[in-house]
């Protein structure tokens, strides 16, 4: 049911209050929600609840404020809503859980804001507003689930996946290859998308879920028994994998002992569990691929592509690169790979990128190492020391690496929030329209520039 005009006005009037007190409300909400509904703990990252990051409470507070601000026209926040919808579908959120969340959220607003602010009229307006938004989101998420089920090999909910190969890519990153434990097929995905991986965490007494970008091209129909999409050719999946497999590449946080009682609140806890305790033959649960960050389907055959990443942010861009190289028109498209890592020891796919640029004349790379080791040689192991500053690129680099003079060029970025925002601003200063720049963030929340 549409909101009454008076209700929209009331919700809009609470925007300044939410801007000031929203995070306090959402922190209180999550504490109560997970305390009163322990069955929901498996849906939320423990570390995303805790200071100093408080990613999930901060994201919810920002979403509530955005909803109140744009209550008369939700168009500006639809990209944020789609990001949340994709995340919810990946977590397999159920429609009935929206009622639990709504009840808890309104209760927290009432308790934290007090009766003088959260009057009966405000409560009624926000109840109607929340229900309206929940209906929109449930409808969109049901459509996502339906699309998953229609694909060849698609499924709804969680699927048992077996690790069929582990490959150490760098000092701190390992690729895991997965194939369905039931021997069935897996659906294609859009290059850049992620999957949710759910594993048992006995120390927490419930499961934990993390999202990891798929780091290889989608498995082609009728593909050979090669786990890496047929580009690298150096990793063969054994017979258990069938013809189609998924790859994720996981960075571990060094120095974390998963047996330490305090480890469970560390942001790298699950990635360390994967590295330390999961081997070939072990089983995890996985969601369908999803996410709104992906290679554009309408990308013209000759449109130049610039892939800009930092650290493990290269994983979705590697999927894009591998996909572009498999296309029939691969040699017609100019591609740039711009990446920064601390040094070669922690630079996944460094050898692959070097080989690709050697074999494909249309692919150029610029690799930065922020802290190169003494044994590394500039011009051999990396191109430049420090971090990439796109504005410092000279005229030739802007033309040949950034394709600034080409209006069809597209830009895809993944890395820390500040890294992406800074590079997006630099591109815009050079005349690139924001619509041609896409960014992904490996955390709860959205990216602004």
Image: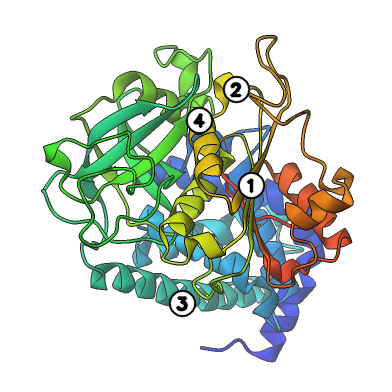
Q: Residue at x 25, y 44 (%)?
A: 226
- Asked if the residues shown at circle 1 and circle 4 are in contact, with their CB atoms under 8 angstroms apart, the answer is no
Which numbered disc, 3 or 1, marks the residue closer to the eye? 1
- CA–CA distance in space, label 1 to label 4: 14 Å
Q: Which residue is mark 3?
A: 135
Residue 431 shown left or right of residue 22 in the figure: right
Q: Which of these two is toward me, 47 or 16?
A: 47
Residue 39 appearing in the image: yes
Q: Which residue is mark 2?
A: 344
Indicate which disc, 2 or 3, sits on the residue closer to the N terminus: 3
- CA–CA distance in space, label 1 to label 2: 18 Å
Indicate which disc, 3 or 1, sits on the residue closer to the N terminus: 3
Q: Residue at x 34, y 62 (%)?
A: 94
Indicate which disc, 1 or 4, sits on the residue closer to the N terminus: 4
- CA–CA distance in space, label 2 to label 4: 10 Å
Indicate which disc, 2 or 4, sits on the residue closer to the N terminus: 2
Which numbered disc, 2 or 3, marks the residue closer to the eye? 2
Q: Which residue is mark 4?
A: 351
- CA–CA distance in space, label 3 to label 1: 47 Å
Q: Residue at x 48, y 58 (%)?
A: 324
- Secondary structure at badge 2 equals helix
Which color scheme did the rendering employ for the protein? rainbow
Q: Which residue is mark 1?
A: 364
Which numbered disc, 1 or 2, marks the residue closer to the eye? 1
């Amino acid at each position: 049911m549409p909101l009454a005009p008076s209700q929209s006005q009331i919700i809009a009037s609470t925007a300044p209050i939410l801007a000031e007190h929203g995070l306090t409300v959402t922190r209180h909400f999550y504490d109560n929600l997970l305390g009163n509904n322990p069955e929901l703990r498996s849906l939320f990252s423990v570390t995303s609840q805790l200071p100093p990051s408080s990613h999930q409470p901060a994201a919810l507070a920002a979403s509530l404020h955005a909803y109140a601000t744009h209550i008369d026209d939700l168009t500006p926040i639809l990209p944020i809503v789609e990001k949340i919808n994709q995340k919810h579908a990946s977590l397999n959120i159920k429609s009935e859980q929206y009622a639990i969340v709504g009840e808890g959220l309104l209760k927290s607003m009432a308790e934290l804001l007090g009766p003088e602010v959260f009057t009966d009229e405000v409560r009624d307006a926000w109840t109607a507003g929340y229900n309206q938004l929940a209906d929109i989101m449930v409808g969109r998420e049901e459509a996502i689930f339906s699309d998953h089920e229609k694909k060849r090999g698609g499924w709804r909910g969680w699927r048992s996946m077996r690790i069929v190969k582990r490959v150490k890519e760098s000092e701190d990153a390992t690729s895991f290859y997965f194939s369905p434990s039931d021997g069935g097929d897996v659906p294609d995905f859009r290059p850049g998308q992620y999957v949710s991986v759910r594993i048992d965490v006995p120390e927490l007494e419930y499961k934990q879920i993390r999202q990891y970008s798929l780091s290889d091209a989608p498995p082609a129909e009728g593909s050979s028994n090669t786990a890496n999409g047929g580009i690298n050719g150096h990793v063969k999946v054994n017979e258990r994998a069938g013809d189609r497999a998924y790859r994720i590449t996981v960075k571990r946080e060094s120095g974390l002992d998963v047996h330490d009682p305090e480890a469970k609140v560390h942001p790298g806890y699950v990635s360390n569990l994967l590295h330390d305790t999961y081997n070939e033959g072990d089983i995890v649960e996985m969601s369908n691929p999803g996410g709104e960050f992906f290679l554009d389907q309408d990308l013209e055959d000759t449109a130049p592509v610039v892939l800009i990443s930092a650290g493990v942010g290269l994983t979705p861009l590697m999927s894009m690169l591998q996909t572009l190289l498999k296309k029939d028109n691969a040699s017609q498209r100019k591609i740039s790979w711009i990446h920064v890592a601390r040094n070669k020891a922690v630079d996944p796919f460094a050898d692959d990128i070097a080989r690709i640029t050697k074999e494909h004349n249309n692919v150029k790379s610029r690799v930065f190492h922020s802290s190169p080791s003494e044994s590394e040689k500039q011009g051999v192991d990396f191109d430049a020391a420090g971090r990439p500053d796109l504005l410092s690129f000279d005229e030739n680099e802007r033309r040949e690496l950034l394709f600034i003079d080409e209006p069809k060029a597209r830009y895809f970025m993944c890395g820390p929030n500040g890294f992406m925002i800074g590079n997006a601003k630099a591109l815009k200063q050079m005349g690139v329209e924001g619509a041609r720049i896409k960014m992904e963030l490996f955390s709860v929340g959205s990216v602004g520039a």
